[in-house]
Image (tube, rainbow, N blue to C red):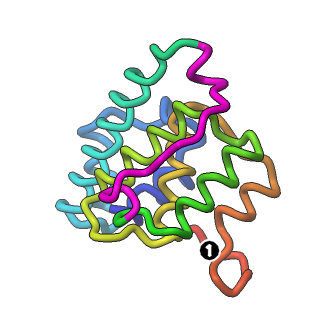
Amino acid sequence: MFDVLVYLYETYYRPEACPDSDALVKKLSAVGFEEDEISKALGWLTDLAKATTQYSRLSEDAVFSKGMRFYARQELDVLGTEAVGFLQFLESAKVINAPQREIIIERALAASEAQVSLDKFKVIVLMVLWSQGKEPDALIFDELFSDDDDEPRQLH
C-alpha cells in the first residue's frame, strides 16, 4: 500500500490531478502494482478524505490548541516512540496543527500494522499534507525522506 501512496505523491502534484478511480486503477495496474495493494491504498485515501472533512469542522480553538495530547496504549503500540516524537516535532515546528495530528494518528492506526515503522509513518504524514494541498518546506521535506543513516531516501 505504501508504495502505491508514494507513487501517487510523485506522479500527481495535487490529489485533484489524479484521474477518476477506474482510470487510476488501470494506470496503477499497468505500472505494476498488485490489485490488492491498489485497493488498500485507494480505500485508505478515501477514508483520509472522510477524516479530513470530519476534522475540518473543528473550531478554531481546536486548530490552535496548546493542550497536551495523551496517547492511548493502542496508539502508542502502533505508533511507537519514534513516530510520537516525530509527530511532536512537526507540531512544535508548526508544520501540522492539532486536527492534522489527529488525522495522521487515525490514518496510522488504519494502516493495519502491529507497529508502523518511522519510514511508513513519514509517508502517512506526507500523504495527509498532500491531500490537503500543503507542501512541506524544504527542510521538513528532507526530514520526511531521510532514513536512519541520514542519507536521502529515494521516493520510488
Residue 12 magenta-highlighted: no
Q: Residue at x 35, y 70 (%)?
A: 115
Give 63 or 2, whichever is nearer the viewer.
63
**Residue 118: image location, x then y, percent:** 52, 70
> Which quadrant of the rendered structure holds the N terminus?
bottom left
**Residue 80: image location, x then y, percent:** 45, 68
Give 156 or 140, whichever is nearer the viewer.
140
Q: Which residues are magenta?
A: 60-76
**Residue 132: image location, x then y, percent:** 55, 31
Label 1: which residue? Answer: 154
> Can residue 4 be spotted in the picture?
yes
Which image quadrant is residue 28 in? bottom left
Please, what secondary structure does the residue beneath circle 1 have? Answer: loop
> Can residue 156 be spotted in the picture?
no
In this rendering, the answer to whether 128 lies above or below 77 is above
Q: Is residue 34 left or right of residue 109?
A: left
Q: Residue at x 41, y 66 (%)?
A: 3
Q: Residues within 10 Å of mark 1 (few under 14, many from 20)?
A: few
Q: Is residue 107 left or right of residue 93?
A: left
Give 130 or 67, whichever is nearer the viewer.
67
Residue 69 magenta-highlighted: yes
**Residue 52: image location, x then y, percent:** 43, 28
In this rendering, the answer to whether 82 lies above or below 91 is below
Q: Residue at x 54, y 44 (%)?
A: 12
Q: Amino acid at mark 1?
A: Gln
Q: Is residue 61 left or right of residue 77?
A: right
